[in-house]
Image (cartoon, rainbow, N blue to C red):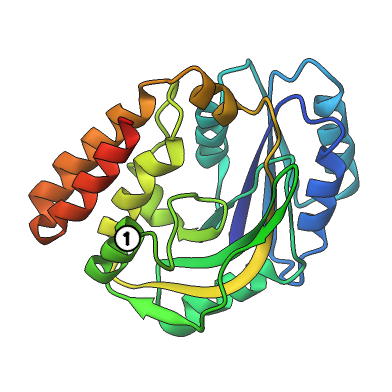
Amino acid sequence: MNPKISIIVPVYKVEPYIRKCVDSILAQTLTDFELILVDDGSPDKCGEICDEYASKDSRVIVVHKENGGLSSARNAGLEKAKGDYIGFVDSDDWIEPDMYELLYDMCIKNNCEIANCTSVIYFKNKTVKNGAHSLTIHDKTQAMKAMLEGKLYDEVVWTKLIKRSLLKEIRFPVGLIYEDTAITYKLIHKSNRICCIGAPKYHYIKRENSTMDHAIKNIRIDGVLIYDEMFKFIEKNYPELRNLVTLKLANSAM
């Protein structure tokens, strides 16, 4: 029998953080899940640590692969996943004990394919707690509008629980930054009902020298490519939202 949830964690050069991340997942109040740790060719002891957890908890599955980047690792996890719903956690972050119970119950009770919570983001000099709104349920057009406006929904996958069937033909783009942005709008488009709640259950560490920091410092063109693709998609399927996506495209080029 398949687990309710598959939680995918790409692992690469996070030896100081990985135990806190994995421990927070294994402590979830919803216990019917599989945890897929994808060792993306990490040169430190991360692979050994992953194997250690697998030897102690039957819910832990470890995939060892050559380094291919975040998207490649997440895609490898998706190939293994058997849960009805999929969650993603970055290996240097951690989550509240009831995060996945909350998101799963939101999906089941409200017949939703995607559930969102909010996050606490730790910058070097400040901490930002996002969201304080009550449960909101949208159809895909309402959700798309809210995402483009930056209200209620965000573009990241780590605050979400996603019906696995939505990901059947969708994978993260390998070799590009903004991989979450590249697929979130496509997942919303395939959904009928999406729900969100302003409960900060995910703890995100904004580390210097991260992949995204390098992307910004190097003025990568990935963002423009991703938002241009989004623009064409929205223009075709949601023409009434064209102005909102035009603004995103313009901002990505600045």
Q: Residue at x 38, y 50 (%)?
A: 184
Between 130 and 35, the one lying in front of the other is 130
For disc 1, the neighbor class at 10 Å (few under 14, some 14 to 19, many from 20) is some
Residue 121 horizontal side relative to residue 186, left or right: right
Q: Which quarter of the rendering shows the C terminus?
A: top left
Give the amino acid type for the residue marked by disc 1 in the picture.
Glu
Question: Is residue 182 visible in this depiction of the protein?
Answer: yes
User: In x, y percent, where is residue 2?
Assistant: 58, 59
Q: Which residue is mark 1?
A: 149
User: In x, y percent, where is residue 208?
Assistant: 69, 30
Q: Quadrant of residue 182?
A: top left
Between 165 and 154, the one lying in front of the other is 154
Q: Quadrant of residue 144?
A: bottom left
Between 224 and 78, the one lying in front of the other is 224
Q: How many marks?
A: 1
**Residue 130 versus residue 58 in the image, above or below:** below
Q: Which quarter of the rendering shows the N terminus?
A: bottom right
User: In x, y percent, where is residue 39?
Assistant: 70, 28
Residue 115 horizontal side relative to residue 55, left or right: left
Residue 204 horizontal side relative to residue 136, left or right: right
Q: Residue at x 63, y 51 (%)?
A: 7
Q: Residue at x 38, y 79 (%)?
A: 137
User: In x, y percent, where is residue 31?
Assistant: 74, 67
Which SS class for mark 1?
helix
Question: Is residue 4 visible in this depiction of the protein?
Answer: no
**Residue 26 versus residue 63 in the image, above or below:** below
Q: Residue at x 44, y 20 (%)?
A: 219
**Residue 126 versus residue 112 in the image, above or below:** above
